[in-house]
Image: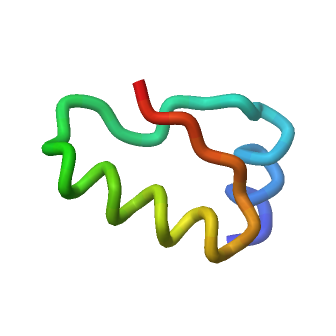
Amino acid sequence: GLKEAKEMVDGAPATLKEGVSKEEADEAKAQLEEAGATVELK
């Protein structure tokens, strides 16, 4: 909800997922960027 979204924004930058395939990471990156996020894959 709103509380979780605020915590995520206030805690940025943050790791959202670890140990996922390149395909899954690229898909998540695309979705986040569509929502206006800046994403860095490591």
Indicate how the structure is coloured in the image. rainbow
Q: Would you say 17 lies left or right of 12 here?
A: left
Quadrant including the C terminus: top left
Q: Would you say 14 lies left or right of 18 here?
A: right
Quadrant including the N terminus: bottom right
Name the residue rendered at 70%, 30% in the picture.
Answer: 13
Q: Residue furthest top?
A: 42
Quarter occupied by residue 3: bottom right
Q: Residue 4: where, in percent of width, then height? A: 68, 56
Q: How many marks?
A: 0
Q: Is residue 12 shown above or below 8?
A: above
Q: Residue 7: where, in percent of width, then height? A: 76, 45
Name the residue rendered at 47%, 56% in the picture.
Answer: 29
Quarter occupied by residue 10: top right
Q: Residue 12: where, in percent of width, then height? A: 75, 34
Name the residue rendered at 19%, 55% in the picture.
Answer: 23
Q: Is residue 4 shown above or below 21?
A: below
Q: Is residue 25 shown above or below 5?
A: above
Name the residue rendered at 68%, 74% in the picture.
Answer: 35
Q: Would you say 42 lies left or right of 31 here?
A: left
Nearer to me, 40 or 16: 40
Q: Residue 41: where, in percent of width, then height? A: 45, 34
Nearer to me, 12 or 26: 26
Q: Would you say 39 lies left or right of 26 here?
A: right
